[in-house]
Amino acid sequence: MNFLNEIAGEYPSAISLAAGRPTDRFFDRLHPQALVDAFARYEAHACPHGNPAKSRAGLFQYGRTAGIINDLVAAQLRADEGVPASADRLLITSGCQEALALCLPALCPDPADVLLVCNPTYIGATGVASMSRIEVHGLPGADLCAEIEQAVERLGRRGKRARALYLIPEFDNPSGRVLDEPLRRALVASCARHRIVVLEDNPYGMFRYEGQPIPPMAALDDAGCVIYLSTYSKTLSPALRMGSANLPETLFGDRRASRDLFQNLVERKSFVTVNTGQIAQAFVGGILLQERMSLQRWVEPIAAWYRRNRDTMLDELQRVFADASATISWSRPAGGFFLSLDLPFRFDADAVAECANEHGVIVMPMSFFALDASQDRRIRLAFSAVEPAQIAAGIRALGSYVARRRVDETRSTRHGAPVDA
Amino acid sequence: MNFLNEIAGEYPSAISLAAGRPTDRFFDRLHPQALVDAFARYEAHACPHGNPAKSRAGLFQYGRTAGIINDLVAAQLRADEGVPASADRLLITSGCQEALALCLPALCPDPADVLLVCNPTYIGATGVASMSRIEVHGLPGADLCAEIEQAVERLGRRGKRARALYLIPEFDNPSGRVLDEPLRRALVASCARHRIVVLEDNPYGMFRYEGQPIPPMAALDDAGCVIYLSTYSKTLSPALRMGSANLPETLFGDRRASRDLFQNLVERKSFVTVNTGQIAQAFVGGILLQERMSLQRWVEPIAAWYRRNRDTMLDELQRVFADASATISWSRPAGGFFLSLDLPFRFDADAVAECANEHGVIVMPMSFFALDASQDRRIRLAFSAVEPAQIAAGIRALGSYVARRRVDETRSTRHGAPVDA
């Protein structure tokens, strides 16, 4: 992401359709007095008849490595996301990224262990793998179950073994894609058969703009193979750094193995961040109590805002690229923060800089999330952290860049240079 | 630490001289309104003429991986601890433990790389090494510089290389020991010669009860070999999860190498916790601003309290063990949270349980922090998180346990059993 920050710093007036951050618009609900109220609400809950001074002293002290608001978070995951979460197998983490940083090396301790990911995928997953020296194997995603079978076989021939599969089944980052329920069920069955643990990441699940909700894989998991990763960065605020990992009741049918994995994660956490900040846990706990363990009402205005942004982006794409529909296409996401746009030419780091510098819009090459060249003609467009007027102006600017590139390409083709230059 | 929690849970009425936590007594200075004030103070500082709503939105958003209060923390480290800290080489971490979890694998990326530690040492350091599969080599600590020379030579014969040395030079956990200034200088020279990076951890430096302060190794480092680790867990509160790592201006004379290491740590952090919670950073920043970048005044009452606790413990030890001075001895720490007590018999996990169950006091075997059997007849006594009356009662209880053990040992010796049984 450093490259993106550099570009944003270099062209501060450019519109960014690159940043997949949540909107700032609703953060004022976390104004200081609201945090104080949340804190007090959590304190009253945690210590209903006890000594408030003693309870507060406990909050400001070191505390349980696995967390203190596990029951509240589990209740919210059950209510809002249909996940069979349980406080005793849920680990509170310093943001969902820490859950990934703990789970991947715990699941892939041996040099022969391999992580499967979709290609493209969220770089927070491949980044942990690279840092932990875990081999990553990419799945193109056209037929995931078959690709898993192939991967298992191919890896096996090299003495390697697929141990985990990282996935965002709902409104994927970066692709925006949704896996349908039959595919989710088939994936659980396939992973169970090969004893592959699914790390189901669901940061965008509460932002659905149309259509019926699909159960998360953790809710369809009758085999004990799905660890469900969750975050409050998109619903509440990234500055709280609050996430969780919920383990299945059994690991491939073995209750003891799931408990052992939980203990392994707790021990790892004790050596990474000791525990998750308890003041921040009290804030989140207080908000969950206030919202009666469902953030549905809380996210409503945010989701409405994102829906409007998505519609603005889709309308503008239609307006700008209608004439080019033979060579330029884009996805229509039913939720989340992103859509993907296919172009008839390569879009690389130079293109980002050129587009920002000459047309005033920053977009994200899909190749930044890819393991190979398959995404070189695709970009990710984020509509979460921009105003509708910026979206419209940004897509028009992108349109003018694309038009110029196409003229250039036509010219260079005429002069005999390769189309992909 | 799980064993200790279990023991504490099993014998809830036992006095704990085992927990090295800060006292709860002064946490009320972080009452919710104080946090709100701190937050407002930081906001005003961060955005003196700007739009407060915009500034707040930025605080609740994702943000700079290396941190946002680096200038304030660097100023405090310069003022209070004499460390030549600089915002541009200081990484804000989610507690000091995260700094260790980032630094050790960055400094020891190769299987041949070895971490040197004192024996015994803080298990947070050896725990990261074990998790990251970094070989640990213990130094007995009687003549550290000579031991480093020997270690380098011995490791070299095995194709290994000492890359880092973890140390708490001031009021060590667990030993309570202080390294004097000549030794600190000699260690810097020795480590510079062998290109060993010193990870100087200083959680207790602001709690000196007598004698003259000794400059931290980072202040004596003219070779560019000391990374200074700091935490607000003991001065403010562990629940803030706020620490830092300050890199030297050059790494062994190479400015670029230090910058590269900093970038490496920032990248690792982005894959572990993304960034440190900005709400918590704003709290700490606001308190630092309120205290004019020195926590000297803030810690005064805490240090006075610890000094009194230490005196109580020393007085009681003198009272209880005066007659046994030939076989039982203890250290007299000039600061920090711990002293160490030498016993004429082994003190292991069974002894902890027996002592807790039959005598109502929980103490920490030094062997829990050790790499070998050298610490088997030693315990760590913490006086930070107990009341003076508990200290006195706890030491008396320990006295009665020790007396019984000595009678038992005498009996079994008479009957021919080994003294160490």
Image (cartoon, coloured by chain):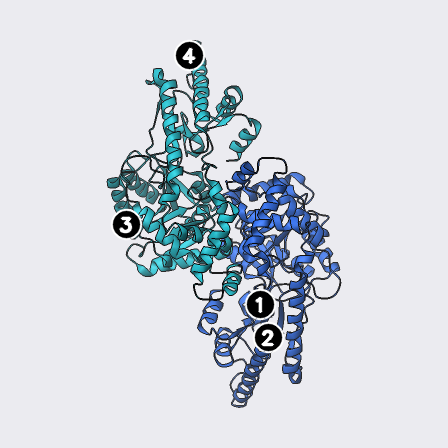
Chain colours: A blue, B cyan
For the point 60% across and 40% down, the residue is A260
Q: CA distance from mark 4 to mark 1?
A: 75 Å
Left or right of A269, for residue A81: right
The secondary structure type at the circle numbered 4 is: helix
Q: CA distance from mark 3 to mark 4?
A: 51 Å
The secondary structure type at the circle numbered 2 is: helix
- Nearer the observer, disc 3 or disc 4? 3
Report crowding for label 1: few under 14, some 14 to 19, many 20 or more residues within 10 A (C-alpha): many
Callouts 4 and 1 in the same chain: no
Label 2, on which residue?
Answer: A391
The residue sitting at the top extreme is B414
Label 4, on which residue?
Answer: B410
Q: Amino acid at mark 3?
A: Asp
Q: Amino acid at mark 4?
A: Thr
Callouts 1 and 3 in the same chain: no
Tell me whether the residue at label 3 lies in contact with that at label 2, contact meaning CB atoms closer than 8 angstroms.
no
Label 3, on which residue?
Answer: B221
The spot of residue A123 in percent (x, y) is: 54, 61
Q: CA distance from mark 1 to mark 2?
A: 10 Å
Label 1, on which residue?
Answer: A385
Q: Amino acid at mark 2?
A: Ile
The reply to whether residue A308 is in sight is yes
For the point 47% across and 73% down, the residue is A12
Q: Amino acid at mark 1?
A: Ala
Please report whichever mark, 3 or 4, sits nearer to the chain's N-terminal start. 3
